Image: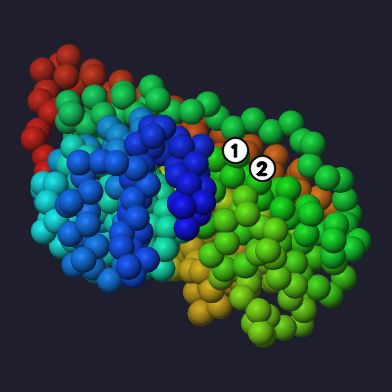
């Protein structure tokens, strides 16, 4: 167990979510709670584990830009933060805020949720089944907070209602963003003709997606088709650990009976059935997700944008589509395949990017990075344009800093 916990600690540090040495894991093996390091936080967290049904608890301060973002959202929320990205809807639901560092406050937040924001301390997450579950919940909370803050900032900038504290947080967060990902190729050349070649290509491409920051936790997926078989990452797998997490699905089996493929399997299957492509990548690049949720169309069905949207939308000439994970009536398999053939990529509202490969994953990964770079550039161009309008109104004597306190 110590090795597993150490591996997830390294993931937190490599992804720049947590300052090196800051993570604290506690794991209850049924006999005693084992801690990853010494800390004066242990008594409070130990009491939390006693009150909860989880096996593992994780507490960590955050590295920038997440530290400023989470502290802003925790202070701004009236008890709960309500992100609207797909991971939150399906996995977190919402993010409770603990007013103080106490077992009562933290365990109360984690009783029915996977993560809790703690003012001045970072994030605590519970793992019902072990450290991987706690790590995933922690990472998903960071992703959700990032997307929510930057999405709300653009919306508020457009409406001229930015507060001073909001702008200060934005400036801190923007100053600490990592550079845009850069990809110069180098992945295995295809087409791949044997199961061994396909599996090796999936493993290689998955590791590169993680290292480039295109996925968080276990929420991306990848596939490659050889003849009538689709090789795809399994449900809940980490793309940088695919050695034992790739399954083979017959193309004629829409459910991949007897296996546990990614929940996005229906979308991968339909994309490859309806096109000449060989492979599919699905990642969650941050600014692609943010820009997919930035919409100024007057809508008659708010709250249903992720499920169904009658409007044709694009960002940076890439189509944005609605759709839900899985094979239901609003599944992505009904929305993505028809548009992805046009430009080799599609952005799903609040969910991420799909790109396609004709022979190997070099082209698909390059396309995903191009989409993310374009979305990131478009985001900051829009923000600065609206901020300049905001500043001009201030110069004219307008009061553009009303005190606000928004839970959503």
Q: Which mark is residue 47?
A: none
Residue pointed to by mark 2: 208
Is 184 situated above or below 199? above
Q: Position of residue 5 (x, y in %)?
A: 45, 51
Question: CB under 8 Å between callouts 1 and 2?
Answer: yes
Looking at the image, residue 54 sits to the left or right of residue 320; the answer is: left
- Horizontal and vertical percent position of residue 231: 75, 67
- Residue depicted at x 21% and y 66%: 50
Identified at 14% across, 47% down, the residue is 101
Most foreground residue, 386 or 74? 74
Q: Judging from the image, what secondary structure is the residue with disc 2 in?
A: helix
Picture residue at 70% right of the left edge, 58% below the top: 243
Compared with residue 353, is residue 93 higher up or lower down, i.e. above or below? below
For the point 84% across and 75% down, the residue is 228
In what element is the residue under mark 1? loop
| Residue furthest out toward the front | 31
């Amino acid at each position: 167990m110590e090795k597993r916990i150490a591996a997830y600690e390294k993931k937190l540090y490599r992804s720049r979510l947590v300052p090196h040495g800051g993570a604290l894991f506690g794991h209850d093996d049924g006999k005693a709670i084992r801690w990853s390091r010494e800390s004066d936080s242990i008594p409070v967290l130990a009491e939390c584990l006693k009150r909860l049904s989880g096996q593992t608890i994780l507490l960590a301060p955050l590295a920038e830009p997440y530290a400023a973002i989470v502290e802003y959202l925790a202070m701004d929320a009236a008890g709960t933060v309500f992100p609207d990205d797909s991971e939150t809807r399906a996995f977190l639901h919402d993010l409770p805020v603990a007013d103080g560092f106490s077992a009562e406050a933290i365990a109360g937040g984690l009783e029915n949720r996977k993560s809790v924001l703690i003012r001045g301390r970072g994030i605590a997450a519970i793992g019902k089944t072990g450290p991987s579950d706690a790590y995933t919940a922690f990472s998903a909370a960071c992703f959700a907070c990032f997307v929510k803050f930057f999405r709300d900032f653009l919306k508020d900038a457009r409406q001229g209602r930015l507060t001073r504290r909001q702008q200060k947080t934005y400036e801190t967060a923007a100053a600490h963003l990592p550079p845009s990902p850069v990809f110069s190729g180098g992945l295995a050349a295809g087409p791949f003709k044997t199961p061994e070649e396909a599996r090796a290509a999936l493993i290689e491409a998955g590791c590169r997606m993680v290292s480039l920051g295109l996925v968080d936790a276990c929420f991306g997926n990848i596939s490659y088709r050889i003849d009538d078989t689709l090789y795809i990452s399994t449900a809940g797998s980490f793309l940088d650990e695919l050695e034992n997490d790739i399954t083979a699905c017959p193309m004629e089996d829409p459910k991949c009976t007897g296996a546990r493929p990614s929940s996005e399997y229906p979308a991968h299957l339909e994309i490859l059935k309806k096109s000449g492509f060989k492979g599919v990548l699905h990642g969650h690049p941050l600014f692609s997700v943010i820009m997919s949720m930035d919409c100024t169309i007057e809508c008659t069905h708010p709250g249903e944008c992720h499920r169904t949207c009658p409007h044709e939308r694009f960002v940076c000439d890439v189509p944005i589509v609605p759709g839900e994970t899985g094979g239901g009536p609003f599944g992505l398999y009904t929305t993505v395949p028809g548009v992805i053939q046009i430009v080799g990529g599609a952005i799903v509202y609040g969910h991420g990017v799909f790109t396609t490969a004709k022979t190997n994953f070099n082209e698909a990964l390059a396309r995903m990075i191009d989409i993310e770079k374009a979305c990131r550039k478009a985001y900051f161009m829009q923000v600065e344009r609206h901020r300049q309008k905001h500043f001009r109104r201030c110069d004219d004597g307008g009061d553009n800093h009303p005190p606000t306190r928004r839970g959503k």
